[in-house]
Image: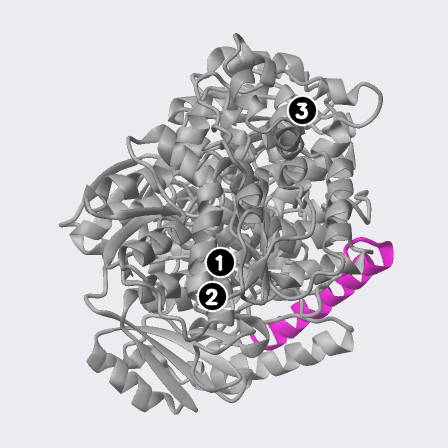
Amino acid sequence: MRRRTRHPCVVGTDDRHAAGPSADLADLAAELGAALAGDVDFGASARALTTMDASNYRRVPAGTVAPRDADDVAAALEICRRHGTVPVVPRGAGTSIGGQATGAGVVLDLTRHMDGLVSVDPVARTAVVRPGLVLGRLRDAVRPYGLTFGPDPSTHSRCTLGGMIGNNACGAHSVAWGTTADNVSSLEVVSYRGERLTLGKGGQGAPAGLTDLVDRNLALLRTGYPPGLPRRISGYALDALLPERGTDVVRSFVGSEGTLGVVTEATVRLVPLPVDPVLVVLGYPDETAAADAAAAGLGAYGALTVEGMAADLVGDARDLPRGGAWLFCEVDGAGTARELVRAADALDAAVVRDRAGQRALWRIREDAAGTATRMPGGGEAWPGWEDCAVPPARLGAYLRDFRALLAEHGLRGTPYGHFGDGCVHVRIDFDLWTGEGVRDFRRFSEAVADLVVAHGGSLSGEHGDGKARAELLPRMYGKELVGLFGAVKDLWDPDGGLNPGMLVRPEPLDSGLRFEGLPLVGVGRAAARCVGVAKCRVAGPSSGASVMCPSFRATGEEKHSTRGRARLLHEMALGEVITDGWRSEEVREALDLCLSCKGCRSDCPVGVDMAAYKAEFLDRHYAGPGGWWRRPRSHWTMGRLPSWLARFGRGLNAAMRLPHAARLAGVTPERALPRVADRTFTSWFADRSSARAPVLTLWPDTFTNHLAPQVGRAAVRVLEDAGLGHELPPGRVCCALTYVSTGQLGAARRVMRRTLDVMEGVEGPVVVLEPSCAATLRTDLPELLPDDPRAARLAASVRTFAEALEELAPDWIPPAVDRPVTGQTHCHQHAVLGDAADRRLRERAGLRGELAGGCCGLAGNFGFEPGHEEVSRACAEDQLLPALRTAPGAAEVLADGFSCRTQIAHLTSGGARHLAEVLAEALDGAGT
């Protein structure tokens, strides 16, 4: 369930970032709130969430408006104009890479309410959409008709149609289906002065004077645009207004980056889906050879995509054919695939027909915008010269010159992109933190702009110009044509209120960088790693390959996404919008619904680790005098659960039956707390003996030891059957998970050091049955104690139950369970440990089927804390509960995580077991 909460009208008082001195923000917010049916928020949190998009730039807005409909849009624009020409910028998913989705006045959030699919006409192959509709939702809706929307950026799961229209987005299939401008037939637009316009061909909807301006400049418009460029996105497409091109106002408007009008509705064209999509991956010796092959016109052989990337982006290329660079070509049908392979003259080729294999390979390409930000060796790379395009025949030569220019400037980058259209994406390791680095950034930008123009190219081939390239447009078009852009802007928007500083009369490309003033170390620097690609904003049920971000999918709120939290931490570190630092209630509120699932650690393309940032924030938020007493009671109780269990054991069962015990413990009375076992696992283990010499240490985690000792006993049964001698640590150990997740990092380090003292002389693998504890030992332990070599050694020794059996008893044959399975893969296992060994073990035991991904929603203390019940259940509804409902009646319900088993027990009439329990039961049933 996604919650759609109405924002209150929150009035801000800081008018430094409004348009002019006459703008009274309090009056503006109040008037907007009274006039609009939608949401108005001028508070610090709303402003902080929209200071950035997916670019290097930052502009602080006065406030945000989420209009309900076109009437709201018109009213908001009229009110902003009357309040001293307050700037307005329309915003979709905020994935723009040029800075054009940021604004210094009012930001229109078109995703909250104006996200509908109005209608679909499968016969005419058209759809009517609202600007906030996510492309993936449109594609899902028209797929039953065998149709799709042709442009498909890699952000298709979260980018909006309005944003695509604003930037003239393209995507991988542009060699077959063109750009967004090629696929839009009409637009409903509101001007800054509130005029409603319907744009079409034949000059329909053009503002007064536009066609006359075109008639006076026919020669310039016919000669001023470079020829042979399928990906010419830069500037205004004024040549679409030529009479021989039908005076197409729609095409000239698409790509205007919110500077001419606000789109409220669009009629888009749809194209037939491939009947039998086949992915052909072609391997070439190097990048230049791949580019030259792409320019040979593979589209003529049926290629619907011609995507290129080299080995420095892919990394592990085990699943790819031989080569140092590859082209990803989708075709329709196996026969076409064979023809393409014959024509491609490739070093090697792979033909992939199964959908799962195709998705896995495409994921490499779709995540490239994020993965390209992480340089070999751990450095960071940034957008800034993201998506130029040259004529396809010039691509190989351009890439050679571009690589040479990078070397000349001492920079590194990893080009990839739409080779069939001559479009190149790249992230570059600019130093954007120092004055000298910013100067180098400008010098390189100017030099590479000249290089692109020398090859007959466009400064932007997909993402638009924004702040990143608009200043350089005279180098591409000349001053006269760029001057004409300004004249056109003034006809559409004579007040200059729509997205000023973009495209026309641009701000300098090295101004307003989001790194200015940010500390070079600390959580702010870490949060700045988020480049805003917004993979965490994917709504609806997640795929099994993704956990991130469960709280966003439950609430639909930006502040509860990984990106939103990173933005708030970024602004906290800057101290301009969020001014109370580590005591910030805005940041605390956003992090309150973070489940610390660690999904972003693996699923975020740039490796944002919000669980770690949350732990540090909570630690600092409650630091200082009185901080301990300001903490939620659940931090005292569940946050220190290992200590309470060690001291009181099963005596806690009686304590929790006392009146008001749940309230005093800071947990919700709606959940029953787990019962402490009558006998600990360590006590049971001490009373038995084994003749086998130990080859591994079995870790008695808190959950197994006190709450689920049957899991430990089952693991011992299986390990003995596998011939693996084992022992427990020589003293009490704890990974400190609960201390970390509640931000008690000082206590966590003390617990960890005591554990390392106990483990000092222990050799060999350490088998951890609880995935969350194993993940803590592998990652949090060495990160919190980086100067203690024992931490790294213990982390390296950790094995999951399945990993230990596979590694230490490779010839052991598990019992034949032979039944279907359902259940949950622990989110920490997904994010940190991996489950490949578990999958193989289940297969060998005859356990058929897949476990659900996502997050169960309980997440340790999270689901027990008051106020989290709705989100906790909604997270379970993402994947876990639907999987349980649709499973066969005889299915074994597996969940190795104690939280996952507890959530299943709370929300269903059944239960779940650890894999060790299932295998042990089968061994006993077989009489072995």
Which callout, 1 or 3, points at the residue further toward the start of the chain?
3
Measuring from the top left, give residue 94's x and y in whole percent. 53, 43
> Disc 3 residue type?
Trp
Quadrant housing residue 64: top right
The answer to whether marks 1 and 2 mark residues whose Cβ atoms lie closer than 8 Å is yes
Which contiguous range is marked in magenta? 431-456
Q: Is residue 664 above or below residue 49?
A: above
Q: Is residue 793 above or below residue 41?
A: below
Q: Is residue 441 magenta?
A: yes
Quadrant housing residue 540: top left
Picture quarter with the N terminus? top left
The answer, for residue 500, to whether it is visible in the render is no
Q: Is residue 196 left or right of residue 374?
A: left
Mark 1 element type? helix
Q: Which residue lies under the disc numbered 3? A: 636
> Disc 2 residue type?
Leu
Q: Is residue 761 left or right of residue 179?
A: right
At x 65% / y 74%, what residue is drawn?
A: 451
The answer, for residue 66, to whether it is visible in the render is yes
Q: How many marks?
A: 3
Crowd class of label 1 (few under 14; some 14 to 19; many from 20; radius 10 Å): many
Q: Which residue lies under the disc numbered 2? A: 805
For marks 1 and 2, give the CA distance: 7 Å
Q: Nearest the camera: 379 or 689?
A: 689
Q: Which residue lies under the disc numbered 1? A: 801
Measuring from the top left, give residue 908's x and y in whole percent. 31, 31
Mark 2 element type? helix
The answer to whether marks 1 and 3 mark residues whose Cβ atoms lie closer than 8 Å is no
Q: Is residue 577 magenta?
A: no
For marks 3 and 2, give the CA distance: 37 Å
At x 42% / y 74%, what residue is drawn?
A: 420
Q: Which mark lies nearer to you, 1 or 3?
A: 1
